Image (cartoon, rainbow, N blue to C red):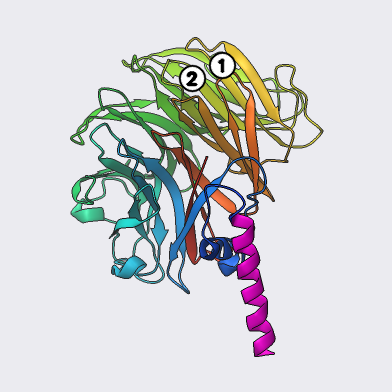
Amino acid sequence: MKNTRAIFYIVILFLSHCLLTKSEPEVSAIDYLIARLAQGIGNINTAESGSMYWIKQYGVEGKETTAVSVVSDLNDDIYVTGYTNGNLDGIYQTSGESHYDLFVKKFNSEGEGVWTELLGVKAANTYPTKILSDLQNNVYVLGNTNGDLDKQVKSGSGTDGFIIKYDGNGNKLWTKLQGHQNANTYFVHGAFSLSENLYIVYYTQTTNNDSITYYITKYDSTGEMQWDKKLGYYHDVQANGIIVDQDEAIYITGSTTQDLNGESVTGLTDLFVIKLNKDKTVLWTKLLGVSSTSTLATDIASDGENNFFVTGHTYGSLNGEETTGYWHLFLIKYDRDGNTWWTRILLDYKSRFMEKMAYHSQSHIYMFGGESPFFLSSYNTKGEKKWSMKLNVYLKAITADTQGYAYLIGTTANKSYSFIAKCK
């Protein structure tokens, strides 16, 4: 029986190698087997358009390691953040086995690990939500903690939001906490301006879970808060993304079941986009929905020319684009005034989970979504689809480097391991 099993794995390894040598660039047979057989990652279909370059896995057996956000810097190095209750890469975990530390991992463009850092609080949880990079190749981790992180004393009575700045070598430069009395504070998303101001959209929830309020806050690159604005959107509003354009105008997207800023909802749930100027004045609000059904926005990206893209999922037909009577991913391009350039609905796969995207200046728009399987698609700025790739994995986030390569992160079925993959 053991010999039969050994022969089976040898045959699988040989066939995997043969399949992968038919297309360039290659994924190693070992990495392909990791993706296909080990830890429940799933099958990556390299036969469709688009090429998978490599896949790397990391984690701690018997513990949980979950990647949540990824970003590239101007040197095309890649940074991943997430949380773990294990000693990742041999680094001692602070919070204890029943709690979670955040981690930051740096990879080069070939998938080689450069460094790993963990940070947490004993007997407390520290969860990152977003990682960002600036023009000096520093990285900023946003998230939430219920402990005095990095010797910073919590200002709120429950959970505080945090910002941690690292340089490219993994040196921690500073940590800031932000909280509200009698409420939990949750940092959702952030974006940098060209002048390296950091804008964060977040919400507070009273400790009895009775009231939710959204805010936007501005920090400079030294960690000093510049202002904090109450947006005043409550229970039925969910903000999911924020970008800043070349004029430092701010765009926030998400979903709402209630009227916003004088604009009326059309469907059960509508997507929204709100634009503010750098002085935090609301300039306009756009809602888009379909009667008797829901349309939810999950991410936003800028094209660097003061236009932007919104993605999410809908059960209805948007702007004349038809669906097939199920949830499908959409992609919409807007100009700076909120006018729609075009709308695309992806009918190839069903989608109602985790739609995310990344934009690259070579006109690549990468986006993923799905439920089972997940899929990755590439569009140009005219709304023309270049390719789609089926991925039977659980994806969490995506980024693009200066050369137009996309990097995907996700988790394994048993959550002990996370992975990063490079494609184009």
Apparent side of residue 366 relative to residue 371 in the rendered image (left or right): left
Q: Where does the magenta region start and end?
A: 1-20
Q: Which is the main secondary structure of the residues drawn in magenta? A: helix
Apparent side of residue 44 relative to residue 125 in the rendered image (left or right): right
Apparent side of residue 77 relative to residue 298 in the rendered image (left or right): left
Query: Tag count in the figure?
Result: 2
Q: Position of residue 388 (x, y in %)?
A: 65, 38
Q: Position of residue 263 (x, y in %)?
A: 58, 14
- Which one is in front, 167 or 386? 386
Q: Type of residue at label 2? A: Ile
Return the residue at label 2: 274
Q: Type of residue at label 1? A: Lys
Q: Is residue 151 above or below residue 311?
A: below
Return the residue at label 1: 286
- Determine the residue positioned at 43% across, 25% down: 361
Residue located farthest toward the right when viewing the structure as drawn: 325
Q: Position of residue 373 (x, y in %)?
A: 68, 50
Can residue 132 be seen here? The reply is: yes
The magenta stretch spans residue 13: yes
What distance separates the C-alpha of mark 2 from that of mark 1? 6 Å
- Determine the residue positioned at 65% across, 51% down: 45
The disc placed on residue 136 is none
The magenta stretch spans residue 7: yes
CB of mark 2 within 8 Å of CB of mark 1?
yes
Q: SS class of the residue under badge 2?
A: strand
Name the quadrant containing residue 228.
top left
- Mark 2 surroundings within 10 Å by alpha-carbon count, few (fewer than 14), some (14 through 19), many (20 or more): some
Q: Position of residue 43 (x, y in %)?
A: 64, 58
Quadrant location of the N terminus in the rendered image? bottom right
